[in-house]
Image: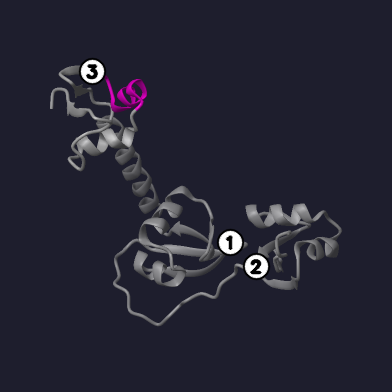
Amino acid sequence: MGRMPIKVGCYDVNGNFLAEFESGRKAADSIGVNHCNIHMAIRNGCKCGGFYWVNITNFKPLKIEAKHYRRGGKKINIYRRPKILIKQAQTFTEAQDITGLSHSSIRSYARRGIWYTGDHGEYFFEFVNPEDAYNQRANYAGYKAAAKRQWKRPVVLIKDSKRHEYESVMDAARDLNINEKSIRNVLAGRWTRAGGYLVEKIGA
């Protein structure tokens, strides 16, 4: 059984709504192109035949309410296909109320500069202040580097009085065929053993 066709909306380059079609094929027939080009334009947010195309089936209404939000937070621009600015949220909480996404998801998509496409619709998030975007990327890069350093520390795995020393958690997991996460859980104190081994940091 094939997939149900999606309703497609057509917009001009200024974001003005022009027409609605019952399927991608009908939208393609209206401008004389292959329907695959229409679906590619929808996924990538680019033009096809000089127009922008939007999946209206997943285009859910916004939940913009008259609430008071604190000032001074990181302002977020919220866009919808084809990158039409629909709201400047004063805080992550306001952006969450509008889109239904969590703070961490909004922050992640804004930092990476990619579209969210899912159960909540399609959104693009952008920090209003370029410095906020830079700080978010720098903080995330620092966090990843710290995490990488942490799990690169030498470890020793002990079983039946035999000691196995490794330069990193990854090396230990690979050599002993143990899940990396299990070793990390032992080091974090959540578990007592990993694959029957006691785990200790070297030089801790």
Q: Nearer the viewer, residue 78 or 176?
A: 176
In what element is the residue under mark 2?
A: loop
The residue at which mark 1 appears reads as 83
- Res 164 label: 3
Instruction: Name the N-terminal-most of marks 2 and 3.
Output: 2
Q: Above or below — where is 77 with respect to 179?
A: below
Magenta segment, which residues?
165-177
Q: Amino acid at mark 3?
A: His
Q: Above or below — where is 167 with respect to 41?
A: above
Quarter of the image with the C terminus is: top left
Q: Above or below — where is 189 with respect to 40?
A: above
Give how far apart the Cα atoms at labels 3 and 1 are. 55 Å
Label 2 or label 3, whichever lies nearer to me, is 3
Q: Does 172 lie within the magenta span?
A: yes
Which quarter of the figure has residue 146? top left
Residue drawn 70% across the image and 65% down it: 6
Residue drawn 16% across the image and 23% down it: 202
Q: Amino acid at mark 2?
A: Gly
Instruction: Estimate the x, y position of residue 141 in percent, counting from the top left.
Output: 35, 39
Give how far apart the Cα atoms at labels 2 and 3 are. 62 Å
Residue drawn 30% across the image and 41% down it: 143
Residue, far front: 160
Q: Are marks 1 and 2 in contact (CB under 8 Å)?
A: yes
The residue at which mark 2 appears reads as 15
